[in-house]
Image (cartoon, rainbow, N blue to C red):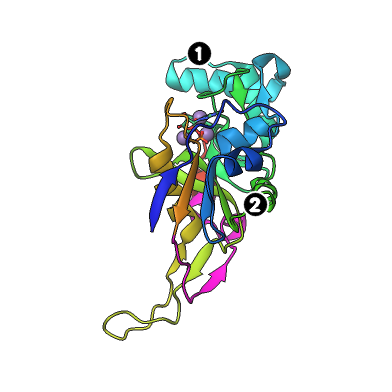
Amino acid sequence: MELFAVPGLPEIREGDDLAALIDERVDLRPDDVVCVASTVVSKAEGRVRDYDDFSPSPRARELADRLEAATGDSKDPRFAQAVLEESTEIILAEPFLLTASRFGHVGVNAGIDRSNVADGDLLLLPKRPTESADRIRSGLPADRVVVTDTCGRPFRHGQRGVAIGWSGLPASRDWRGEHDRDGRELGVTVQNVVDELAAAANLVAGEGDGGTPVVVVRDFEFGDHAGSDAHFRDVETDFVRQALREWRYD
Ligand code: GDP
Ligand code: MN
Ligand code: MN
Ligand code: MN
């Protein structure tokens, strides 16, 4: 398996046809996995916003005040309003806003990004990233697309790439029922393939001014395993999320 960045992509703007821009720059093969940073998907889909697009509700003002008290840094209530509008649930209100986005992804600040946004203050995540992945895929000769974002995680320092949308391959590879080297049957292992591809692609894409939001994964074989599209946990079976909610200082 090999990974390489698509060279020479321009600054992406609302209405740009990402698939066409990619297709012009690389000879894709049907079994390539094209990993696209959500940043450029959002830009193409017109998800750039300014602070002034958000008028803070009393709830947003209260959240901003709480964050400011907890961190000592000033917080813009318009930003808190943007996070609220993108979220269905606040999981942690301090010392940072951890929320569930409308499409199920849990992230800090609902994944709203302030880096690599040329035409405004804020960049919202794509509204429905799996539909974005479907759309990009339909314009490409490659049959597999993953939309990625850089995301933090509990228990570990640093951020890494995760998949927030995918098309043309299952999210996970199910190892249950297969055997280890001692013949022991695997009982629980479901490998999240789209997250692992997203992490590898994100490593190549970088985080700064590299200008390489699209990475091709070539010769990745899903193999002869059962697949599953389960990706974001349901609230009911997410014990960590439930525990955090119980421990929220409200
Ligand atoms: P995110 O992880 O989806 O939030 O995206 P990042 O802001 O980390 O950017 C990932 C990569 O895409 C970096 O190499 C950026 O320089 C690059 N990038 C971001 N926006 C654009 C753009 O509009 N055009 C190009 N060519 N590269 C971009
Ligand atoms: Mn960014
Ligand atoms: Mn981002
Ligand atoms: Mn990133």
In which quarter of the view is residue 51 placed? Answer: top right
Where the N terminus falls, by quadrant? Answer: bottom left
The quarter of the picture where the C terminus appears is top right
Q: Residue at position x 26%, y 84% from top?
A: 182
Q: CA distance from mark 1 to mark 2?
A: 42 Å
Helix, strand, or loop for circle 2? helix
Q: Residues within 10 Å of mark 2 (few under 14, many from 20)?
A: many
Question: Which residue shows up at 46% across the image and 72% down it?
Answer: 223
Can you give x and y, in whole percent of width and height, for residue 37 in the image? 53, 39
Q: Which residue, given by chain and number where applicable, does mark 1 sit on?
A: 74
Residue 137: mark in rendering:
2
Q: Hey, what amino acid is under mark 2?
A: Arg
Q: Nearer the viewer, residue 51 or 209?
A: 209
From the viewer's perspective, is residue 86 above or below residue 19? above
Q: Earlier in the sequence, mark 1 or mark 2?
A: 1
Residue drawn at x 52%, y 39% as measured from the top left: 248
Q: Is residue 6 visible?
A: yes
Q: Position of residue 57 (x, y in %)?
A: 72, 21
Which residues, given as a range, are shown in magenta? 219-242
Q: Amino acid at mark 1?
A: Ser
Residue 153 shows in this picture = no
Q: Is residue 155 magenta?
A: no
